[in-house]
Every structure is written in C-alpha cells, then in structure tokens.
C-alpha cells in the first residue's frame, strides 16, 4: 500500500506568517523606504 505524500507546508500557515517570513528576509533600507511611500 502506497503512503500519501504529506501536504505542502504553506497550506497550513496563515497568510500573516507567510508574509512575515518574506519580510524578515528583505533588506531593511528598501523595506523602510516602501513603508514611507505607502503612508
């Protein structure tokens, strides 16, 4: 009997966690510049 493959990890994560994981990897200077422009 073949075992089912586990579901992808991102399916169980809320969007906030996924976005946070992306943002913490960005360099701080462009991130702060984007924040200033968005205000």
Image (cartoon, grey):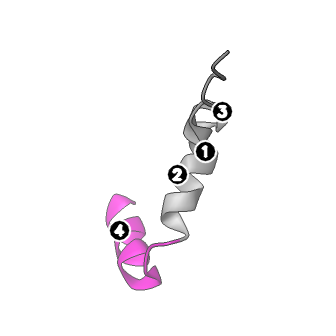
For the point 56% across and 36% down, the residue is 8
Spatial CA distance of label 1 from label 4 is 18 Å
Say how many tags the image has. Answer: 4
Residue beneath disc 1: 16
For the point 63% across and 48% down, the residue is 17
Residue 30 falls in which quadrant of the image?
Answer: bottom left
Comes first in the chain, label 3 or label 4: 3
Element under label 2? helix
Element under label 3? helix
User: Disc 3 or disc 2, which is closer to the eye?
Assistant: 3
> What is the span of residues highlighted in magenta in the rendered image?
25-39
Residue 24 lies left or right of residue 1; in this view the side is left
User: Disc 3 or disc 1, which is closer to the eye?
Assistant: 3
Spatial CA distance of label 3 from label 1 is 12 Å
Residue beneath disc 2: 19
CB atoms at circles 1 and 2 under 8 Å apart?
yes
Residue beneath disc 4: 34
Residue beneath disc 3: 12
């Amino acid at each position: 009997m073949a075992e089912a493959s586990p579901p992808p990890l991102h399916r169980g994560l809320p969007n906030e966690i996924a976005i946070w994981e992306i943002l913490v990897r960005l360099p701080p200077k462009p991130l702060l510049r984007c924040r200033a422009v968005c205000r």
